[in-house]
Image (cartoon, helix red, strand yellow):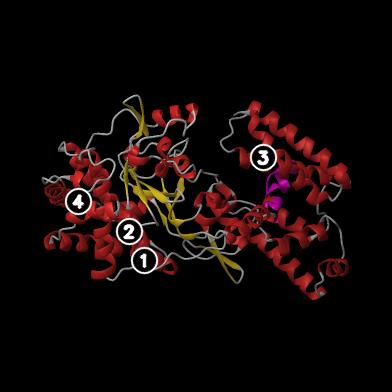
Amino acid sequence: MDEKGVIRYIEPVFRFCHHRLDNWHDAEDLAGEILLHILDGIGKYQIESLEAWVWRIAHNRYARFINARNKRQSILSGQELYEVAEECLQVEEPSVEEEYEPVFRCLHTLSSEYRDIFVDYYIGEMSVKQLAQKYALPETTIKWRLNVGRSRIRERIGTEQMDKVYQRINWNTYGCNGSMDSHRYLHSQIARAICKAAYEKPLTVEEISMCTGIPTIYIEDVLPELEYGDAIRKNGNKYATDFIVFRLKDRADTEAVQEPMVRAIADHYERLLWQERDLGEIGFYGCDFGMERLGYILLPYLIRQKLEALKNHRLHLSSGNFPPRKDGGHGWFIVTESSDANEEPGKYSTGCNVNDTGEGHMYFYWVNRFYDRRVFRSGGIAWLAEQGIPQKCPGGTVPEGLIAEEDMARLVQNHLVRKADGGYVLNFACFTRKQFEDFCAPYKAEDEKLDAMLCDWILSVRKSFESFVPTRLHGQINQWISVYCGELIGHVAEELIRRGRLERPEGQPFVDGVFYVEGEFMLV
């Protein structure tokens, strides 16, 4: 294990010590001792979880420090907490750290309202009267919290739940349905562990600690940010995850896209999109790209429009308006469990990124199987939109000097611009609003048999979600149906590639789903 990984624990370890010792010099001494033992252990042992190892050492060294400072064999001699440890630890002649480690581990599963009083009473040796003054509480409340704290430690010490194995939570948290930054709140393993623990039912801070093995002090540090991001909702003294997690086991229980349905939909759109039609009459830039490229715009647009129309109007399963969020965004979290640490969404997952250019919008229909991050980031469409490039390129031609040489090289590499006739042109279609509407209109033919098949599938998906989504989150199912059913686009695109109708994505960044539309945002 890389010793550099310890660097990020220097400050938290010092805070851990200073919070408990309330003495800067003692805290520095103890923190230094803890870090030395951590580094020494990294060179000697096979450590599966650095996080668990760091706090195990911190608790053990803290116990030894208190023991040495008070010059007594028992950290809490003569107090009920000592009795708790004696009741539960039957090892013959244990070391100090072995004997009292369970006490300290359990102590950190208590919420701050109990833990702080407990530490001040037993370690700070403050009287009940002093505690009542410090916390501005009646003495009876102080006594009650001490009693409850002792009882909870007795219950928890030695339980299997205290021997947590810290396992990585592999969630893809970059997705959303709306405009928001899900990953901002769910990027850390602690945040994910809290949300995973409080997913099935609301839990108190202490219950979350028991489920995760994470000390309450760290849970309490993270909860305010999760509440602000609307990832967690507080009700009384309990917390509940406020978004649906589409787990691997849930996917296995949800009716998948069936091959006969994929073939039927591919047949329908193959007949529509590859009929004889002169796109040049519409006059948009890119009309000569051919349906093998333009199909990557039409296919997702038409299927998404059809699914939403059936879901909202025929089946009355509307997602409703995007909910406003405390941080100024709007929409829902889209969180999926992945099978490994790469945290990739499913290969057939689809979506549409939209970027405002000032005078119009850039749209990017993508299928994860063909997705290349360079198209969106790293000088991709996000940069093009920010610079307002599309509206400055009449007829798709990039004016000389508009884009710096270094930026142009990156755009060419990302396949968003290409060389042509001694200059450069955009490598994606550009429309006015009317041109886009005229482009799509002829392909919206109805097929009642196909619609009935899709309705049956949507209802089946809804029923599956109802079986595994917690009842309090059922109001979010309809928007998740749109996300899940959108995977149909990936399957149909793959079938049309197999038939030789759509261009096969190979080699360079794939940009056929990118296009620009002048004017206000369109719901696509």
Disc nearer the start of the sequence (4/1): 4
Q: In the rendered image, which residue does mark 4 sit on?
A: 258
Q: Nearer the viewer, residue 195 or 302?
A: 302
Q: What percent of the width, then of the height, locates residue 183? A: 51, 49
Look at the picture and state if 259 lies above or below 421: below
Q: Quadrant of residue 165?
A: top right
Q: CA distance from mark 4 to mark 3?
A: 49 Å
**Mark 2 near mark 1, Cβ–Cβ under 8 Å?**
yes
Disc nearer the start of the sequence (4/3): 3
Q: In the rendered image, which residue does mark 3 sit on?
A: 54
Disc 4 versus disc 3: nearer the observer: 4
Instruction: Name which residue type carries label 4.
Output: Gln
Q: CA distance from mark 2 to mark 4?
A: 17 Å
Q: Secondary structure at mark 3?
A: helix
Q: What percent of the width, then of the height, locates residue 150? A: 72, 63
The circle on residue 319 is 1
Q: In the rendered image, which residue does mark 2 sit on?
A: 482
Q: CA distance from mark 4 to mark 1?
A: 24 Å
Q: CA distance from mark 3 to mark 1?
A: 45 Å
Viewer can see residue 334: yes
Q: Is residue 214 left or right of residue 415?
A: right
Q: Quadrant of residue 220?
A: bottom right
Instruction: Name which residue type carries label 3.
Output: Val
Q: Which residues are the magenta region?
A: 86-104
* Residue at image point 25% right, 52% down: 256
Q: Secondary structure at mark 1?
A: loop
The circle on residue 108 is none
Callout 2 environment at 10 Å: few (<14), some (14 to 19), or many (20+)? some
